[in-house]
Amino acid sequence: MPRPKGSKNKPKTVKTTVDFAAQIAEKQSAKEATTAEIASITANIDALKTDLKTKKAELKSIDKELARIEAKKIKAETKAAESAKKAEAEDVLKKLLASGVSADDILAKLK
């Protein structure tokens, strides 16, 4: 039989008893805290989603109103340009009539 090697004077290690119940309780509390945190974040995300939805709806209505106002502005500018053109034509007509030009000559100039 071969002889054993190594020191015979090694200190004997005593196996420590592991407290599994404490570890389980610690992990359970960590799990519950994380679950609560996730629920809080999820609720916050849901609140932000609804806020985002209302803001998008508000933006959409503002865009519609802006387009409507721009259309009114263009219409008013067109109307003002037409009235200015009409006033100018009337001015020219009055000047021509005042200078003694006949109606046939005026019609020819307008065409």
Image (cartoon, rainbow, N blue to C red):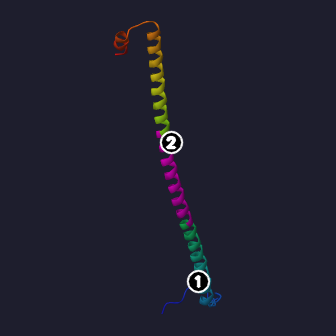
Check disc 1: other Cα within 10 Å, few if <14, some if 14-19, many if 20+. few
In the drawing, what numbered circle is on residue 83?
Answer: none
Going by the numbered disc 2, the residue's amino acid type is Ile
Q: Does the magenta stretch include residue 48?
A: yes
- In this picture, residue 110 sits left or right of residue 3: left
State the residue in front, 40 or 96. Answer: 96
What span is colored magenta in the figure? 47-71
Q: Nearer the viewer, mark 1 or mark 2?
A: 2
Cα–Cα gap, marks 1 and 2: 61 Å
The mark nearer the N terminus, 1 or 2, is: 1
Going by the numbered disc 1, the residue's amino acid type is Gln
In the drawing, what numbered circle is on residue 28?
Answer: 1
In the drawing, what numbered circle is on residue 69?
Answer: 2
Residue 8 position, x and y percent, is 62, 89
Residue 69, compared with residue 2, is above or below; it is above
Does residue 72 appear in the picture of this structure?
yes
The residue under the point 59% across, 83% down is 28
Q: Is residue 103 magenta?
A: no
Does residue 18 appear in the picture of this structure?
no
Check disc 2: other Cα within 10 Å, few if <14, some if 14-19, many if 20+. few
Q: In which quarter of the image is residue 35?
A: bottom right
